[in-house]
Amino acid sequence: MKRIYVLDTTLRDGSHAVSHQFTLEQVKNVAKGLDDAGIDYIEITHGDGLAGSSYNYGFSLFSDEEYIKAAAPYLKNSKLTVLLLPGIGIKEDLERAKEAGAKVVRVATHVTEADIGEQHIGLAKKLGMEAFGFLMMSHMVDKEKIVEQAKLFESYGADVVYVTDSAGAMLPQETREKVLAVCESVSIPVGFHAHNNLSLAVANSIEAISAGAQYIDCCLRGLGAGAGNTQTEVFVGVLKKLGYKTNADFYKIMDVAEKILEPIMKKPQVINNASLVIGYAGVYSSFLLHTQRAAEKFGLDVRDILIELGNRKMVGGQEDMIIDVAYEMHNNLHYSDKGG
């Protein structure tokens, strides 16, 4: 059986679920536990990547560099990874992350916009880092478009390219078709990132592997935006049952989830009505908290807002427009109530 590389993003995607309020001690302890459990890559930044801490996306307790420096000394085997969304993070942010201890960067773009990541991939290689291309919202386009964009990342020098189900909207057959198409079209390894809004994260991750993916994203206890991500400890157990090779220790990763991560979770990661609708409507998973706040502010059903965001095909980076959509919906409802 082929070797599967596990990338744990609890300390990045999981940041959404705790409103980006991880402490330095928590980051250190989780990272140290993941390293000891044999996880290959550990991603650490604000939920929206380098420089994501802002009014628009939510402020974290500490800077990305402080989080990276808190964890870096304790990683003996795992590679410290950061996420960068061009336009949120800039090249100087990547340089500071590298100096703080990052070894790998994932350059994340919308699935049709790989070209805006070319300079960041190039800088990462110049800095001696591994560089991954990360194609977000892959459910929104056909496999031919994903292949086209994956080839661009490959041409820029990316070491790995990811098919990313940012909305948790993809079904297993779709996952297989899209991942297989990319695997057959590029010469670099392929990764897959799932969200669990339709309760398919583990199933989709296994489909991705069967189609040729070698890199899979996970989070302890499934912690992450929306309904969370593929659950690390569950996924490691499934890999063992299927006979795939991985460095992860099944017992140790379960203990990290239960003894280190679970006590600092604000609430269990579940598929509630709002996160279910995210997957159904194909909305960016990190929109959840923003949409819940807008629904409360304007007295709307969060599901109605999410459906409208899906109808408008809004994508990551447009979080500031959620309040505008809610305001417009509130006014239209108010106008209708008056018989207008």
Image: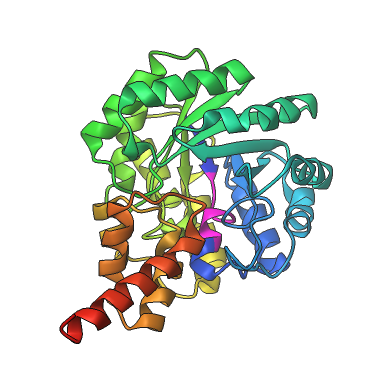
Name the side, left or right, on which 108 lies relative to 230. right
The residue located at (64%, 27%) in the rendering is: 118
In this view, the residue farthest toward the bottom is: 338
Which residue of the protein is positioned furthest toward the right in this rendering?
99
Residue 203 x/y as whole percent: 28, 41
* Residue 37 included in the magenta stretch of the image: no
Measuring from the top left, give residue 8's x and y in whole percent. Answer: 54, 47
Front-most of 107 and 259?
A: 107
317 left or right, relative to 329: right
Say which residue appears at 54% left-offset and 41% top-offset: 7
Residue 285 x %, y % = 40, 56
Determine whether 37 is above or below 184 in the image.
below
Q: Is 78 on the left or on the right of 294, as rendered?
A: right
**Residue range corresponding to the magenta coloring:** 8-15
Report the residue at 76% width, 49% height from top: 72
Q: Residue 240 is drawn in which quadrant?
A: top left
Residue 9 makes an appearance in the image: yes
Answer whether residue 211 is visible to the viewer in this image: no
